[in-house]
Image (spheres, helix red, strand yellow):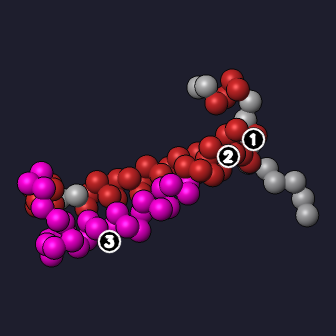
């Protein structure tokens, strides 16, 4: 098997960039699902699972939140293990 040649950085830099993008995308999906109707109910202190208009938001949040957490853990692991202090502090 030949050497992997990347155009935009090292293998780990590319993975870290991909993870950062994935985290932002999942957070955006949750934000998009947090509609005005959901926001109003949430501000009133309503139990969101009792309202049909919150189903999409709750489903999205339940699917995306564990992925975001896992992506952040992997990102932190790779950052600590493979990037030098200078790059982590940028």
Where does label 3 land, which residue?
A: 59
At 43% across and 49% down in the image, what residue appears?
A: 24
The answer to whether the residue labelled 1 contacts the one labelled 2, judged by CB atoms less than 8 Å apart, is: yes
Residue 46: where, in percent of width, then height? 12, 61
Q: How far is the residue under mark 1 from the one under mark 2?
A: 6 Å
Which quadrant holds residue 88? top right
Where does label 2 land, which residue?
A: 77
Label 3 environment density (alpha carbons within 10 Å; few <14, some 14–19, many ≥20)? few
Report how many numbered discs are placed on residues in the image: 3
Which quadrant holds residue 9? top right
Q: Which mark is residue 81?
A: 1
Q: How far is the residue under mark 3 from the one under mark 1?
A: 34 Å
Q: Is residue 14 at least partly visible in the picture?
A: no
The answer to whether the residue labelled 3 contacts the one labelled 1, judged by CB atoms less than 8 Å apart, is: no
Q: Quadrant of the C terminus?
A: top right
Q: Secondary structure at mark 2?
A: helix
- Highlighted range, magenta: 43-71
Q: Nearer the viewer, residue 87 or 14?
A: 87
Q: Which mark is residue 27?
A: none
Label 2 environment density (alpha carbons within 10 Å; few <14, some 14–19, many ≥20)? few
At 87% across and 54% down in the image, what residue appears?
A: 3
Q: Secondary structure at mark 1?
A: helix
Q: Is residue 26 at least partly visible in the picture?
A: yes
74 displayed left or right of 5: left
17 displayed left or right of 43: right
Q: How far is the residue under mark 3 from the one under mark 2?
A: 28 Å
Which quadrant holds residue 38? bottom left
At 42% across and 54% down in the image, what residue appears?
A: 25
Residue 55: where, in percent of width, then height? 23, 73
């Amino acid at each position: 098997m030949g050497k992997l040649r990347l155009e935009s950085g090292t293998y780990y830099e590319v993975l870290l960039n991909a993870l950062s993008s994935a985290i932002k995308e999942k957070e955006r999906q949750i934000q998009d699902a947090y509609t005005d109707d959901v926001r109003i109910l949430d501000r009133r202190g309503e139990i969101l699972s009792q309202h049909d208009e919150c189903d999409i938001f709750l489903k999205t949040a339940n699917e995306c939140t564990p992925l975001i957490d896992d992506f952040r853990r992997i990102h932190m692991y790779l950052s600590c293990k493979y990037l030098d202090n200078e790059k982590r502090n940028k």
